[in-house]
Image (cartoon, grey):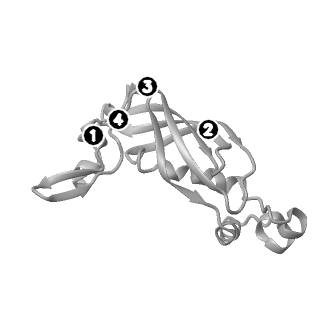
Amino acid sequence: MKDSFSFLREVEPNVFIETYGVDFEDFEVGQVFEHRPGHTFSEASSLSYAGNVFDLSPGYADQRYARRVYGDRIKVSETFVLSAMALTTKTFGKVVANLSVTDCKVEPVYVGDTLYFESAILGKRKSKSRPDQGLLHVSSRAHNQDGAYVLSFERKLLVYRRHVGPYTAAGY
C-alpha cells in the first residue's frame, strides 16, 4: 500500500493526525476506490430531503400517498440518490471543483436500500493554467445491498497537488 493512502499520519511518536483526501500525484489511471461506509435511505431522511428541497411531488413528500400508490416500496427521490455522491468525499477530499457530471444513470432506489460507491480513475493530467492543481476523469457507480447497480456517472474534477492548497496549511 502506498504511504500516501495511509489513513493516519504520525506527527510525533504515538501522536497521529487523520489525513484527508488523496493527493493528485497519487492517483493513477486504472485505480478503483471503494468508498465506505455506505448510506441507507430511511423514510425519515427521504421525507426530510423532499421538504428541504421543496420537492412537493406526493410520491416523495407525502408518505401516506406513497404507501397507497407504491405499497411498501417507497421510492427515494433521484436527486437525493444522486446527492449520495458525497460518499466519495473521503477519497476525493482535495477536490477544488467538480467541473462536470455526465452520463448520469439512476435506477429506482427505495427506502431501506443501502448504497455503496466505487470510483475508477479514467484519466489524469496536470492543469495547464493552474500549476498547483490537476484534472481527474472519474467514473463512479453505486450498488445497493443486493449488489444491483443503481447509479452511475462520470465526473471531471480539479484536484490540489501535493503540498499546496489549504490542506498543507491545516496540517493534513
Q: Which residue is at the far left?
A: 13
Position of 159 with respect to 6 (left or right) is right
Q: CA distance from mark 3 to mark 2?
A: 17 Å
The secondary element bearing badge 4 is classed as helix
Q: Residue at x 86, y 65 (%)?
A: 71
| x and y, in percent, of residue 26 in the image | 32, 33
Q: CA distance from mark 1 to mark 3?
A: 16 Å
Task: Nearest to the eye among marks 4 and 3: give it.
Answer: 3
- The residue that appears at 48% across and 47% down in the rendered structure is 35
Q: Is residue 74 left or right of residue 39?
A: right
| Nearer-N-terminus badge (3/2) | 3
Q: Which mark is residue 4?
A: 1
The residue closer to the viewer here, 72 or 170, is: 72
Amino acid type of the residue that numbered disc 2 sits on in the rendered structure: Phe
Residue 19, position in %: x, y?
A: 29, 51
Q: Amino acid at mark 3?
A: Val
SS at mark 2 in the image: strand
- Mark 2 is surrounded, within 10 Å at the Cα level, by few (under 14), some (14 to 19) or many (20 or more) other residues, namely some
Number of the label disc, if any, that sits on residue 29: 3
The mark nearer the N terminus, 4 or 1, is 1
Q: Nearer the viewer, residue 16 or 145?
A: 145
Give residue 13's position: percent from left, percent from top: 9, 56
Q: Please state, as top left, top right, bottom left or bottom right, where the N terminus lies in the image.
A: top left
Label 2 or label 4, whichever comes before in sequence order:
4
Residue at left offset 77%, top offset 65%: 60
- The type of residue carrying mark 4 is Phe
Q: According to the image, label 2 marks what residue?
A: 153
> Between residues 23 and 98, which one lies in front from this camera angle?
23
Q: In the rendered image, which residue does mark 4 sit on?
A: 24
User: In 3D space, how far apart are the residues under numbered discs 4 and 1 (Cα atoms)?
Assistant: 11 Å
